[in-house]
C-alpha cells in the first residue's frame, strides 16, 4: 500500500530563460500523488499523456484553453470556490 502522505521531495533549478515545461519528467515520479502546476508548466499534450499513464494533476487553465464540462457540482455559497 502506498504511503498516504506525499510532499515535494525534490526540486530542479534552472535559468530564467529555460521553459518549465522541459522539466515535467524530472519532477513526476509517483502515480499515487496529485501534482499541482502553475501555468508555466502547462503542456496540454504532455498532460494528456500523463493522464493516460495514470498520473493526476491540477493546474490553472490558460485563458484560451478549450475545455468541455463533464459534470457540474453544487458549491456552498459560503465557499470561495468559483468553479472547478
Image: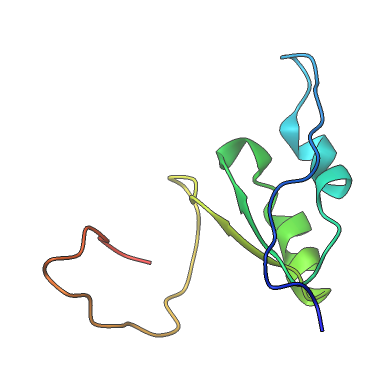
x, y percentage for residue 5?
67, 65
User: Residue extending furthest left?
Assistant: 77
Q: How is the image coloured?
A: rainbow
Work out whether 3 lies above or below 25. below
Identity of the residue drawn at 79% across and 70% down: 31
In the picture, the quarter occupied by the N terminus is bottom right
The quarter holding residue 16 reads top right
Work out whether 27 lies above or below 19. below
Total marks shown come to 0
The foreground one among 46 and 75 is 75
Identity of the residue drawn at 67% across and 41% down: 41
In the picture, the quarter occupied by the C terminus is bottom left
The foreground one among 78 and 51 is 78
Identity of the residue drawn at 48% across and 50% down: 60
x, y percentage for residue 70?
45, 83
Q: Is residue 14 left or right of residue 7?
A: right
x, y percentage for residue 75?
22, 75
Q: Is residue 12 left or right of residue 39?
A: right
Q: Is residue 49 left or right of residue 71?
A: right
The quarter holding residue 63 reads top left
Amino acid at each position: 500500500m502506498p504511503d498516504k502522505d506525499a510532499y515535494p521531495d525534490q526540486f530542479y533549478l534552472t535559468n530564467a530563460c529555460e521553459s518549465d515545461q522541459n522539466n515535467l519528467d524530472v519532477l513526476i515520479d509517483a502515480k499515487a500523488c496529485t501534482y499541482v502546476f502553475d501555468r508555466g508548466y502547462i503542456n496540454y499534450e504532455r498532460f494528456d499523456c500523463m493522464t493516460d499513464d495514470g498520473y493526476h494533476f491540477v493546474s490553472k487553465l490558460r485563458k484560451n484553453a478549450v475545455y468541455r464540462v463533464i459534470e457540474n457540482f453544487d458549491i456552498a455559497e459560503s465557499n470561495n470556490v468559483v468553479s472547478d
